[in-house]
């Protein structure tokens, strides 16, 4: 792959315990190309979030990344960045939508102020400029600028989730990480949000690392998929291969454990 946006090499992450250490991520390597929608799938507890936090450099003790691991973004090893470099790395290069992100908005700030908060720490903006940029970003996720003066509790779950995504896009990151971003939402809203992300990815050119335990949803939106089992990436292939001719026994087992896909595909062109 030429010039990947992200290269993860030999990533090993342990959780340090009083008696013994637990190896949560075992020698994981993968690349994400520019503009690619990459899925990370696997059952709960297999290490997906641990990887996402490490890429964003948001991991905290007891998580310990072993020496020899590399996470390359924009030619630099994220694991070697100092505090100043990290500040410009976050939001600008990699932004992360957390699991249950819709509850991560500050309840006492209006939507406009949540945007201002992020924009002012990373760029020189006035409140008026931030408001204008926020209105543009909200439009990207199909939300009327009327909502700028609303508080989070006045917005539905799906709308709050889209607002978080819009905030994550505010500094034009190269990579958007979404860790189970829609798990708490109903199926129709999930699809709408993922469809929207897909359109924006094409228009704005960012790459996506999408994490879910729902492989059925994942094959519909991803270009390539990595399958995790107990901290290891056991298979990494394009979505069609994962769906039509899975190589690893565990991938086959995952399919056997879930109902077959029905209905319209989100990206019909990908199934050709
Ligand atoms: P996933 O996101 O795939 O559900 P996680 O990355 O959250 O999995 O967790 C991977 C493994 O690491 C799990 O077995 C989990 O119990 C363990 N783990 C996660 N966080 C901690 C922690 N703070 N301390 C100890 N073990 C942890
Ligand atoms: Mg998780």
Image: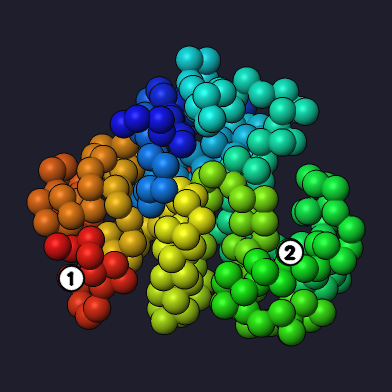
Q: Which mark is residue 133?
A: 2
Depth check, front residue: 123 or 255: 123
Q: Position of residue 271 (x, y in %)?
A: 18, 63
Q: Nearer the viewer, mark 1 or mark 2?
A: 2
Q: Position of residue 162 (x, y in %)?
A: 59, 70
Q: Decide if residue 264 is on the left or right side of residue 256.
A: right
Task: Give the residue displayed 29% in from the left and 48% down from the top.
Answer: 224
For label 1, count other residues whose C-alpha is less than 10 Å away and answer few (under 14), some (14-19) or many (20+).
few
For label 2, count other residues whose C-alpha is less than 10 Å away and answer few (under 14), some (14-19) or many (20+).
some
Q: Secondary structure at mark 1?
A: loop
Q: The C terminus is located in which quarter?
A: bottom left
**Above/below status of 22 relative to 36:** above
Marks 1 and 2 sit apart, C-alpha to C-alpha, by 42 Å
Task: Give the residue displayed 26% in from the left and 40% down from the top.
Answer: 236
Q: Position of residue 258 (x, y in %)?
A: 23, 66
Task: Give the residue displayed 38% in from the left and 48% down from the top.
Answer: 36
Total marks shown come to 2
Inspect this view and state whether residue 213 appears: yes
Q: Secondary structure at mark 2?
A: helix
Quickly name the residue at label 1. Answer: 260
Depth check, front residue: 40 or 176: 176
Residue farthest toward the left in the current orientation of the protein: 245
Inspect this view and state whether residue 41 appears: no
């Amino acid at each position: 792959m030429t010039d990947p946006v992200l290269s993860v090499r030999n990533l090993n992450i342990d959780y340090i315990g009083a008696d013994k250490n637990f190896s949560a991520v075992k020698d994981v390597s993968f690349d994400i190309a520019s503009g690619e929608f990459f899925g990370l799938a696997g059952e709960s507890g297999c290490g997906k979030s641990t990887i996402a936090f490490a890429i964003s450099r948001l991991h905290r003790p007891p998580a310990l990344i072993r020496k020899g691991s590399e996470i390359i973004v924009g030619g630099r090893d994220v694991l070697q960045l100092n505090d100043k470099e990290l500040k410009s790395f976050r939001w600008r290069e990699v932004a992360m939508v957390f699991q249950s992100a819709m509850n991560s908005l500050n309840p006492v700030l209006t939507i406009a102020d949540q945007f201002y908060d992020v924009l002012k720490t990373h760029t020189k903006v006035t409140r008026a400029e931030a408001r204008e940029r926020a209105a543009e970003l909200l439009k990207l996720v199909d939300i009327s600028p009327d909502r700028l003066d609303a508080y989070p509790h006045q917005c539905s779950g799906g709308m709050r989730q889209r607002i978080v995504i819009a905030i994550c896009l505010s500094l034009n990151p190269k990579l958007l990480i979404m860790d189970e971003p829609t798990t708490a939402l109903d199926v129709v809203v999930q699809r709408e949000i993922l469809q929207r992300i897909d359109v924006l990815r094409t228009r704005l050119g960012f790459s996506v690392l999408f994490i879910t335990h729902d492989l059925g949803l994942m094959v519909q939106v991803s270009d390539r998929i990595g399958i995790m089992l107990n901290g290891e990436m056991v298979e990494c292939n394009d979505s069609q291969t994962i769906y039509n001719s899975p190589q690893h026994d565990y991938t086959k087992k995952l399919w056997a454990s879930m109902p077959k896909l029905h209905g319209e595909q989100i990206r019909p062109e990908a199934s050709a």
